[in-house]
Amino acid sequence: MAADRTTLESFPAGGPRGSWPAEEFAAEQQRAGVPAEVVMDQPTDQFLVIVRNPQLAVA
């Protein structure tokens, strides 16, 4: 569910390097202490670098 996450950046899935730009960006964020992760958003055909927001999730 999109409401439980914040998107930091998006990268086109059809790029020549695949998910690597998103993975590299997420790694930079993780080194800075941000719990970023990469997910694939199939409807938009993009890799998203997100941070989950558990306080916004509906239980």
Image (spheres, grey):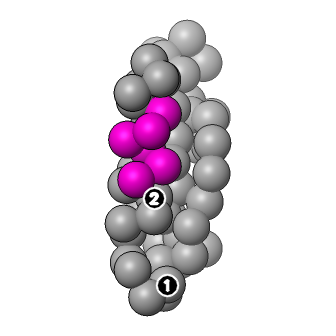
Q: Main secondary structure of the magenta part?
A: helix
Residue in the image at 40% along x and 29% along y: 30
Secondary structure found at label 2: helix
Give how far apart the Cα atoms at labels 2 and 1 are: 11 Å
Residue 6 location, x and y as percent?
62, 35
| Identity, as a three-letter code, of the amino acid under mark 2 | Ala
Nearer to us in this view, 6 or 19: 19
Which residues are the magenta region? 24-29
Horizontal arrangement in the rendering, residue 19 relative to residue 47 (left or right) = left
Nearer to us in this view, 57 or 14: 14
Q: Does the magenta segment cover residue 19?
A: no
Residue in the image at 52% along x and 55% along y: 48
Nearer to us in this view, 58 or 42: 42
Q: Which residue is mark 2?
A: 22
Q: Taking 57 as reference, is 48 above or below it?
A: below
Q: Which residue is mark 1?
A: 15
Residue in the image at 52% along x and 41% along y: 50
Residue 8 location, x and y as percent?
63, 42
Residue placed farthest to the top in the image?
Answer: 55
Q: Is residue 57 visible?
A: no
Q: Is residue 3 visible?
A: yes
